[in-house]
Amino acid sequence: MAAFVKPVIAGNWKMHKGPSQTREFFSRFIELREATADRTILFFPPAVSLAAAVEALAGRPDLLLGVQNSHWEREGAFTGEISPGMARDAGARFALIGHSERRHLFGETNEEVGRKVAAAFEAGLTPVVCVGETLEEREAGRLEEVILGQLDAAIEGIAPELVAQMILAYEPVWAIGTGVNATPEDAADAHGRLRRRLAERIGDDRAAEVPILYGGSVKPNNAQALLAAPDVDGLLVGGASLDPESFAAITRS
Ligand code: 13P
């Protein structure tokens, strides 16, 4: 972990759980997980379930919410999209930007990711920017080129003091939903490269403030080892965040 950073444990529910299942999840999760000052815990439910989540978490200000995607415009003729200002109004404080599924299934480009990051900051949301290489890119020796290119594009034109407030997530595409997690050494290597590039862009002190999360097949049985790796400041959990027991266990890692 970097100095001073409190571990961030985030659950990305992807296209799972409507409002009813969201209420069920939180009624159980709240029983299982008492408030804690030593972890930041975030949830990214589907946008249609945000209101149910806000209501369910009314007594738990320690459990924070975000959206899985937000547009770069404030409003307009963009059918199916939501703006960061609307997300904030609905109770989100964070926005996942550039998740690999957005990039690879929906064609989101580096340039669009940069615009979304700027818009999220402008609306008062903390962007959680996701980067990661495919297996093909990794095997071709292009890990650094790909993830640093994604990082550079995401923070292009953003003031260093704002960049210091974002969260970064390294999610190798080959580890997402496959059951094959990166080893703690692989994660530390990629996170170290990202931290050094951040330091070049915004200075060492500010770079040390940015939590860098690892995501990709995180489970209760590998969370602790991943979290103990150098420069791994938290975890972004997909499948294992859908079950209250397993996610509560991960938050205790
Ligand atoms: P899994 O934990 O299901 O591999 O998903 C990781 C992820 O994409 C989180 O954003």
Image (cartoon, rainbow, N blue to C red):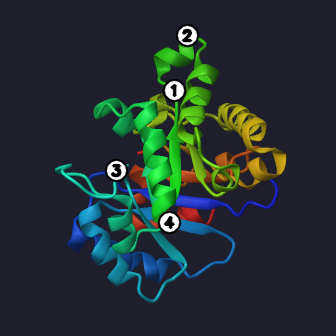
Residue 207, given in percent of the width and then of the height, sits at 75, 47
Task: Report the front residue among 212 and 149.
Answer: 149
Q: Give the quadrant of the C terminus.
A: bottom right
Does 231 sit left or right of 81 as displayed? right
Residue 162, given in percent of the width and then of the height, sits at 64, 55
Sooner in the amino-acid sequence: mark 4 or mark 2: 4
Residue of label 3 = 71
Q: Amino acid at mark 2?
A: Ala
Mark 4 vs mark 2: give the one in front: 4
Residue of label 1 = 133
Residue in view at x 61 percent, y 66 percent:
252
Sooner in the amino-acid sequence: mark 3 or mark 2: 3
Q: Amino acid at mark 3?
A: His
Mark 2 Cα within 10 Å, few/some/many (few <14, many 20+)? few
Q: Which mark is residue 225?
A: none
Mark 4 vs mark 1: give the one in front: 4
Q: Regarding mark 4 in the picture, which secondary structure is present there? A: loop
Residue of label 2 = 140
Residue in view at x 51 percent, y 58 percent:
121
Residue of label 4 = 124
